[in-house]
Image (cartoon, coloured by chain):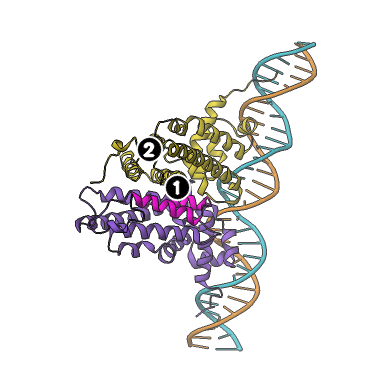
Chain colours: A purple, B yellow, C cyan, D orange
Amino acid sequence: MGRHREFDVEKALDAALCVFWRKGYEGASYADLTEAAGVERPALYSAFGNKEALFRKVLARYYERYADYLPDALQLPTAREVAAHALQGAIDLTTRYPDHTGCLGIQGVLAGSDEAEPVRQALIEARVEAEAQLRERFERAKAEGDLPETARPDTLATFLMAVLHGMAVQAKAGFSRDTLEAVAEQALATWPAGKGDGALRPKPQP
Amino acid sequence: MGRHREFDVEKALDAALCVFWRKGYEGASYADLTEAAGVERPALYSAFGNKEALFRKVLARYYERYADYLPDALQLPTAREVAAHALQGAIDLTTRYPDHTGCLGIQGVLAGSDEAEPVRQALIEARVEAEAQLRERFERAKAEGDLPETARPDTLATFLMAVLHGMAVQAKAGFSRDTLEAVAEQALATWPAGKGDGALRPKPQP
DNA sequence: GGACTTTAATAACGGTCATTATGAAAAAGG
DNA sequence: CCTTTTTCATAATGACCGTTATTAAAGTCC
């Protein structure tokens, strides 16, 4: 019983996601959030809890609906394709929407005021988990002979994450998709060759 | 004539630099700054102007005294050494001080509230200039035969910057120096070989 | 239809933000 | 010594922060 909710919770969550994406956790104020959602302040509180809880819900939605290229990438047959797909997915995500470029997950890792610490920690953990998934995938690739014996899965995973983060920073600074694709190509140029994908290299050295 | 300044301007600037480095432009409050500097609020204002002006002075000091590895790197004989030195310099800078990891210049590029926009723009410009210097250096390297004809200096510069940014993010997330050095090594593994430094490649392809 | 419950909207809360008015203290010139 | 100039410290400013009473409206159940 009781009154029905008049606003669309999903739409409000998407609006909050856009605001957090554009301004980061600290940069987004409740005034921004309520204006974007078209909903008064107490409605947001009753529906999602406080700012941190709202951000966590937004973050879950982000990983589920936007930054969802990693699970797909992990299932590709070769480690090189995994890396290439992850890079391309990140480029698409960070340059597709002109009004909120970059990566929602990365913005918060760097913002530094004290009350944002729990959020920062949550983002770091998500990052760690993604890197662990990549590492495990590359370990499998090594076991399957898809990566050479000299390859170090942990280093490859960390390196790939570094490039992904760097591209996110550059996307936030306004870099074009083409520029980032050149960066990704360069990153893949050093990829250790497996026994099966030598022909996949985009630009075989002359 | 008039009263003498009682606090050390240089020390206050260094203290402000540490605070901005640790918390970013927005995360650092005047309460933090005055406490770190051991100076009352109006003294900071009279000496440096408002928060934005103080940050710009701090940023100039940062590039002059901390992130000063780029000029040295640019003067090394080969493009590969330039890249290697820049990577190593960034690793040192972002991991040397345990209480303010990461890169002061990168923290601000991502923080997003509206009043930080001019600061963000200044940081982006500094980043663009650094990238331009690298590109010009790599163009010279190409002309000198230090990079192959197929190499693209702009892509190499952007790629190198991406790795530097990514490592700064990872340093802020707590990565160790050893981990970042492995990332740098992997990044260098993709570096195009010049006519003179083929023997320098750490892991020649079998 | 009236008791009850949930949501909506207005407005206020204390706290912190960057910034500054105010006046006392200190140093220099005449 | 007294005036002038600069810096110092205290404290206040208005604006905005995230959060929440409070009251009115809307809907459900008996």
Indicate the chain on which mark 2 is placed. Answer: B
Q: Do the dots labelled 1 and 2 sit on one chain?
A: yes
Q: Is residue A44 above or below residue B104?
A: below
Relative placement, left or right, of A145 versus D4 is left
Relative to B133, say whether A130 is above or below.
below
Mark 1, residue position: B155
At 49% from the left and 44% from the top, the residue drawn is B107
Q: Which residues are magenta?
A: A167-189
Front residue of this view, candidates B98 and B125: B125
Amino acid on which disc 2 is placed: Arg
Is A144 contained in the magenta span?
no
Q: Residues within 10 Å of mark 2 (few under 14, many from 20)?
A: many
Amino acid type assigned to the residue bearing label 1 in the image: Thr
Q: Which residue is more in the foreground, B169 or D26?
A: B169
Q: Relative to the observer, which residue lies in front, A87 or B3? A: A87
**Mark 1 residue element:** helix
Residue A191 vs B134, above or below: the answer is: below
Q: On residue B80, which mark appears?
A: 2
Judged by its main secondary structure, the magenta piece is helix
> Where in the figure is residue A50, as x and y percent of width and height?
49, 60
Residue B96 in the image: x percent, y percent? 38, 34
Picture coordinates of residue B128 (x, y %)? 53, 43
Q: Secondary structure at mark 2?
A: helix
Q: For residue B14, which numbered disc appears in the image?
A: none
Res. A46 in view: no
N-terminal of the pair, mark 1 or mark 2, is: 2
Residue for point 53% across, 73% down: A8
Question: Within 10 Å of the Cα at label 1, are there few (<14), some (14-19), or many (20+) other Cα atoms?
Answer: many
